[in-house]
Image (tube, grey):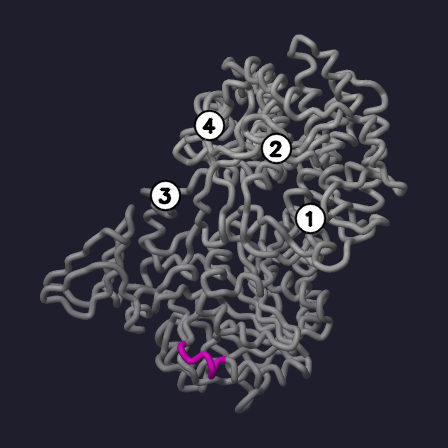
Amino acid sequence: MALYPVIMCGGAGTRLWPASRPSRPKQFIPLAGNRSLFQETALRVAPLAVDGGMVVVVAGVSHRPWILEQLDEVGLLEHVQVLLEPEAKDSAAAMAAAALWTQRNDPRGVNVFVASDHHVPDEKAFRKAVIEATEGARLGRIVTLGIRPTEPSTAYGYISAQGAGLSPVAAFREKPDTASAVEFIRAGYLWNSGNFIVQANVLVEELKAYAPGVEDAARRALASTEVTRVALLGQAFRDSPKISIDYAVMEKTERASVLPVSFDWSDLGSWDSIAATGEGEYGQHIFEDAERCLVRAPEGVMVGVLGVSDLAIIAERDAVLVCDLSRAQDVKKLVARIKVNSPRHLDFEAVRVESLADGGHRFAEWLRCAALPLWATAGQDEGGGFVEALGLDGRVQHGPRRARVQARQIWSYVEAGRLGWEGPWLRAVEDGCRYFERHHLNSDGLCRTLINSDGSPLDETVTVYDQAFSMLALSSARGVVIDGDRLEETAVRMRHQLSKRAHLRGGYVESGKRLYQANPHMHLLEACLAWREVGGDAAWLEMADDLVELALASFIDNQGGFLREFFDADWRPAAGEDGRLVEPGHQFEWAWLLARYAALRDRPEVLRTAERLYEYGLRGVDERTGIVRDALSDDGRPRGGRARLWPQTEWLKAALKLSEVGNSAYVFQRLKEAEAALAAVSLYFLPVGLWRDKRLSTGKFIEEPAPASSFYHIVGAYSQLQASVDRIGPAGRLRL
């Protein structure tokens, strides 16, 4: 039987105000050493999860950032299953969800339920006790660890055992007064540590018998949850009764056993218990004629202590507690008064998440005032050619020029004009079109891939990818330049010439070493949809139909719901790692295009495919940073931690589009994801109208010039954002 330790992250830690508050409760604060109690707990139980087991964390959704950041700091993020509660329902519901998850993954699995905020210095002794308790769990018992008391504490509940060693529980006792605590110790009672070791299926059976409402709500919640590594439990979880496991099961079951243990243990629930560890001090302080005081202060705050003793002095930036350590249990009374007189000090000030409208206005201002003017001047030479990159100092990076960049920049400036930018967009487009036709178009109607900066040919290779972007640019420019009909003729001729590259099994053969790729087809689909939207002939829609059918039949893994990148001549996954590559950014980009196509052709099954691609793309979002990674393997595992700019923009586009046309049950969720995507995009922008392109797993960006090719992604993301915000209502309308 594999062990599945479950870390329960409930509890508010009210007696540890002002350091512990609802948005940052005590388990996430270093209280007895350099690590938080949650981190210490995770490191303590992780060695138990061997032979197929796994650590499970159950926490409130609002604590997600703390969970992920702190697991990452101790190197456990990729090895833990996180279940997030949409609403706090006490320990019974949380344990039910974890037990049901375990049962689904391993019917014989044993859960080790531990609190996230307990202090256990002797980790080896703890694990030894758990292994011993597991023997009882394998016999169908619910085993709790009973701590041999060191004093008659009123802070803990008590357990009476029927015998020595691992034995059935005779009775549970609530937290007593001092006199009762003395009597309990004389009678050989143990402290109730709140740790439980039990087979998952046994706990589920007991919940069904004694708390059926809890078990039912948790089961329905898990059934509607897409269990990724960090999973938000379904809304049915809110239907659970709010009850602790003690009241729900432990005081009723006949399966309860207790194992007496002697290792040091504390729930560190008050400032006196923290002072007793000798490791609770934090921050700068100076003592003068002061003894036995506990001082904690935030960075930059100095606390001076003079002529006093036995005090807790706890400073935060917005509140200070001074209390006699002997009265530490009464901090709750103080918090009750604060709730009435100054409720804003009950919690830290919330970090405001920027709305789509606010973020959109900031995005528009950056484009209008910085990026669009810069790339229409420094980014385009006197002959009309667009440069490949600008240094972070704004200087042109001279070198060869690709057809795709010329096409992308033409499209971007047409789109800017359509969106309301009053700068010289038309001049940029007309000059760009003349340059493109003069230097990139061949006599056969296709475009060469690369030219020198003086316009002379450098590489005559013709790629499907370049033709796709060329046709997209021509579709956008058709309605704004003087000779638009000629541009349409050029695009139609290019489409006809591409038919000579058609593959017998559908699609087109690319140039270079990788002949069979999904990516060029994606941009061909984009060009087809664009031409259809501006009144192009019926052949564009026929081509779009063929491309979508190829994607559905070959590019997209119907079982896994994801899209691959590279294939063999039969459009089967390529051999080796190429065939296993999954790019989250392309899951989003295809989802955006397929959602557009589905609406155009009234094909709800294609929309469902788009939603599945989007959901799979979310696996690429780094749980800690909220940024889309570049690549995954087909088993969903990350391939490195690098994150380029363009996948963030495609996440934003797809989230917004699916909020409009996708499953109506997920509209709010998609809009929240769009807010997160917009925040991710913004991280890459520089105030002067430039951007970073590659972010490393360390959080640092590679120091390199800003590539012009990113502008297409940026403008496209803003275009979708403006359209979506305009749909929300007049108050949020955006304009360049």
- Count residues near mark 1 (Cα–Cα under 10 Å), then give few for <14, some for 14-19, many for 20+: many
The three-letter amino acid code for the residue at tag 2 is Arg
Give the numbered dot on residue 454: none
Please tell me which residue lies in front, 74 or 337. Answer: 74
Whether 670 is drawn above or below 596: the answer is below
| Residue 298 showing in the rendered view | yes
Between the residue at mark 1 and the residue at mark 3, the CA separation in whole angstroms equals 42 Å
Look at the picture and state if 521 lies above or below 128: above
- Residue nearest the viewer, comparing 688 with 62: 688
Query: Which residue corresponds to mark 1?
Result: 616
Front tag of 4 and 3: 4
Label 2: how many residues lie within 10 Å, few (<14), some (14-19) or many (20+)? many
Q: Answer with mark 2 or mark 1, whichever residue precedes in sequence.
A: 2
Pointer 3 residue: 343
Q: CA distance from mark 4 to mark 1?
A: 29 Å
Q: Secondary structure at mark 4?
A: helix
Give coordinates of residue 259: x percent, y percent: 53, 84
- Tell me the distance, in whole angstroms, between the alpha carbons under discs 4 and 2: 31 Å
Residue drawn 51% across the image and 14% down it: 424
Q: Amino acid at mark 3?
A: Pro
Which badge, 1 or 3, comes first in the chain's sequence?
Answer: 3
Q: Residues within 10 Å of mark 3 (few under 14, many from 20)?
A: few
The answer for how far apart the CA atoms under marks 4 and 3 are is: 33 Å
Residue 269 screen position, x and y as percent: 38, 65
Question: Residue 463, image x and y in percent?
Answer: 72, 36
- Disc 1 versus disc 3: nearer the observer: 1
Extent of the magenta region: 121-126
Which residue lies under the disc numbered 4? 362
Q: Nearer the observer, disc 2 or disc 1?
A: 2
Residue corresponding to mark 2:
402
289 left or right of 485 in image: left
Q: Main secondary structure of the magenta part?
A: helix
